[in-house]
Image (tube, grey):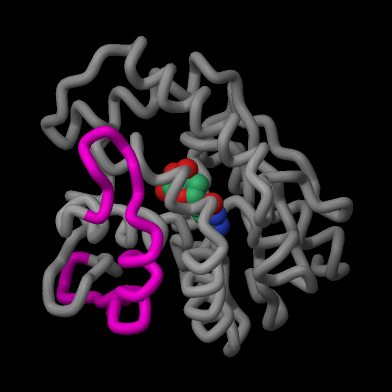
Amino acid sequence: MQIPDIIIAIDGYSSTGKSSFAKKIATELSLLYLDSGALYRSVTFYAISNGIIAPSGEIDRQTLCKSLHDLDIHFEDRGNGSETYIGDRCVEKEIRSLAVSDRVSPIAAIQEVREYVDEKLREFGKKKRVVMDGRDIGTTVFPDAEIKIFMTADPMIRAQRRLKELESKGEKNTIDEVLRNIKERDFIDSHREVSPLVKADDAVVLDNSNMSIDQQLDWVKKLIKDRFNID
Ligand code: DC
């Protein structure tokens, strides 16, 4: 299917399958996929690794903000598809751990961190033909995105999906731990002062609680066809 040069913004709650959906769309429609959460996760991993977040969870905000100037987070493909790097180190696995998930929402609530990430995302999105997922892509990063999707799903279904994903990476957690993390992130992401998670007025809601990835793909293709009068 041939589509015009557009930006597709996918926002929504944690573990609704935004990344899998966005990757699938990117492959199917020849768009560049960008995972904005990976940038927030990388900042968090950096902060944990450098003692900027204390074991109690307290954040040394001043040191973090100073470090952002020199923090080189980027995506690279060294043969395994696009992966996240801090400098020369691939951090793709580390940033998906529950340890990082547990600390990422307070980090993502810091204004300076959001400015750092937004600047990178806007740079990546300059060429259009991008599908980007996150929490504020359609509201703040690309308010003029041609297609905006807001994803949601039942919290228990999300927790089960996330548990499976963590297990496949060798991380053992309980369903209660994962569900708690999901609910906590929903709350912090939706209630923070800077760029909270809200549905953009012109976003279309996708509740994928009972949908396969292929059904979701058919849904988005129809949305794009209708929007741009494609046969
Ligand atoms: O999509 P994810 O679970 O990888 O995102 C990790 C965290 O980053 C999430 O809890 C909220 C934050 N985030 C955000 O605030 N804004 C974005 N555009 C993307 C992610």
**Left or right for 137, reference 40:** right
Residue 139 counted in the magenta span = no
Q: Is residue 182 positioned above or below 68 on the image?
A: above
**Which residue corresponds to the image point at 27% horizontal and 33% vertical from the top-left?**
56
**Which residue corresponds to the image point at 48% horizontal and 70% vertical from the top-left?**
117
Residue 177 spot, x, y in % from top left: 33, 16
Q: Nearer the viewer, residue 18 or 36?
A: 36
Q: Is residue 25 positioned above or below 99 on the image?
A: below
**Left or right for 18, reference 66:** right
Residue 56 counted in the magenta span = yes
Q: Specify start and end residues of the magenta stretch as a single range.
A: 52-80
Q: Is residue 167 positioned above or below 90 on the image?
A: above
Residue 85 in which image quadrant: bottom left
**Which residue corresponds to the image point at 13% horizontal and 78% vertical from the top-left?**
88
Residue 34 spot, x, y in % from top left: 46, 67
Residue 145 in which image quadrant: bottom right
Quadrant location of the N terminus?
bottom right
Q: Is residue 16 positioned above or below 51 on the image?
A: above
